[in-house]
Image (cartoon, rainbow, N blue to C red):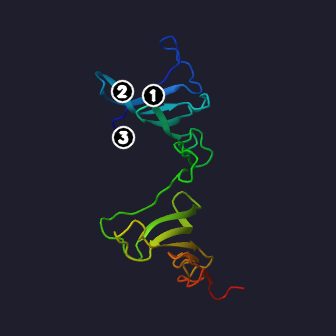
């Protein structure tokens, strides 16, 4: 099929018609986003850019490796914010991630309020009421490329109506779910452990009334 596309091509050859192999760190293409500098109306400064290079590897006989990076300006300089390596690893705040998603806080000062922050939430325009799910962190796997099954998840639920009377009136429960090995009972329907808004922990019970309450059948 035919479709429009934007194509960036990189060749290291110095003679027309005799291209040379690209090598590590060669830039294959850059897209710039620019705006007018307030101090000089005739000058355009870069506010963001997307660039692709070869990363740490040279091209071989079968393929050209690629690394994509995303840059934004903080008024002082243009900084690399996110990177996607040739193997799909994604780094935010780090240029060489070693796991699938690695997030680093590069703006902190070492205080207790700094560090990488992952926020999950919801906003449907209505009041947050009891049992509204605020976010979920799932753990899943697949035996093929399409049949993805969830094995466990951690979810946060509002335990009562949130009000605007103060910043801390947001009661929330944290629930932990794991799937079982039976075919007639969904283990993800009921949490195995709960930490409620009072700080009580329940194992085998969803409504702990003590700091630690363990349900029946535990030895």
Q: Earlier in the sequence, mark 2 or mark 3?
A: 3
Q: Nearer the viewer, mark 2 or mark 3?
A: 2
Find residue 50 and report its image quarter.
top left
108 relative position to 3: left or right: right
Foreground of the two, 100 or 72: 72
90 relative position to 168: left or right: right
The structure residue drawn at horizontal position 59% and vertical position 83%, both measured from the top left corner, is 210
Q: Dot 3: within a 10 Å radius of its alpha carbon, few (fewer than 14), some, or many (20 or more) residues?
A: few
Pointer 3 residue: 1
Q: Is residue 167 above or below residue 16?
A: below
Q: Nearer the viewer, mark 1 or mark 2?
A: 2
The structure residue drawn at horizontal position 38% and vertical position 29%, both measured from the top left corner, is 46
Mark 1–mark 2 distance (CA, rounded to whole Å)? 18 Å
Q: Please provide percent x and percent y for residue 187.
A: 56, 77
Give the label on residue 45, or none: 2
Label 3 element class: loop
The structure residue drawn at horizontal position 54% and vertical position 34%, both measured from the top left corner, is 66
Label 2 element class: strand
Pointer 1 residue: 29
| Residue 55 in view | yes
4 relative position to 158: left or right: left
Mark 1 in CB contact with mark 2 (< 8 angstroms):
no
Mark 3–mark 1 distance (CA, rounded to whole Å)? 25 Å
Give the label on residue 84, or none: none
């Amino acid at each position: 099929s035919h479709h429009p596309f934007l194509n960036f091509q990189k060749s290291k050859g110095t003679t027309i018609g005799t291209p040379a192999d690209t090598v590590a760190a060669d830039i294959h293409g850059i897209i710039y986003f620019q705006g007018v500098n307030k101090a000089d109306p005739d000058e355009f400064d870069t506010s963001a850019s997307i660039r692709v290079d070869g990363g740490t590897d040279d091209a071989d006989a079968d393929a050209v490796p690629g690394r994509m990076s995303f840059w934004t300006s903080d008024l002082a300089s243009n900084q690399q914010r996110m990177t996607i390596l040739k193997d799909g690893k994604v780094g935010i705040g780090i240029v060489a991630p070693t796991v699938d998603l690695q997030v680093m806080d590069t703006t902190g000062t070492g205080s207790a309020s700094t560090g990488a922050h992952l926020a999950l939430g919801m906003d449907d325009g209505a009041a947050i009421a009891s049992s509204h799910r605020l976010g979920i962190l799932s753990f899943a796997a697949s035996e093929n490329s399409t049949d993805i099954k969830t094995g466990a998840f951690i979810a946060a639920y509002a335990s009562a109506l949130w009000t605007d009377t103060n910043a801390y009136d947001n009661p929330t429960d944290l629930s932990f779910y794991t799937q079982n090995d039976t075919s007639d009972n969904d283990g993800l329907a009921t949490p195995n452990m709960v930490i409620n808004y009072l700080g009580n922990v329940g194992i085998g019970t969803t409504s702990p009334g003590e700091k630690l309450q363990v349900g029946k059948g535990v030895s």
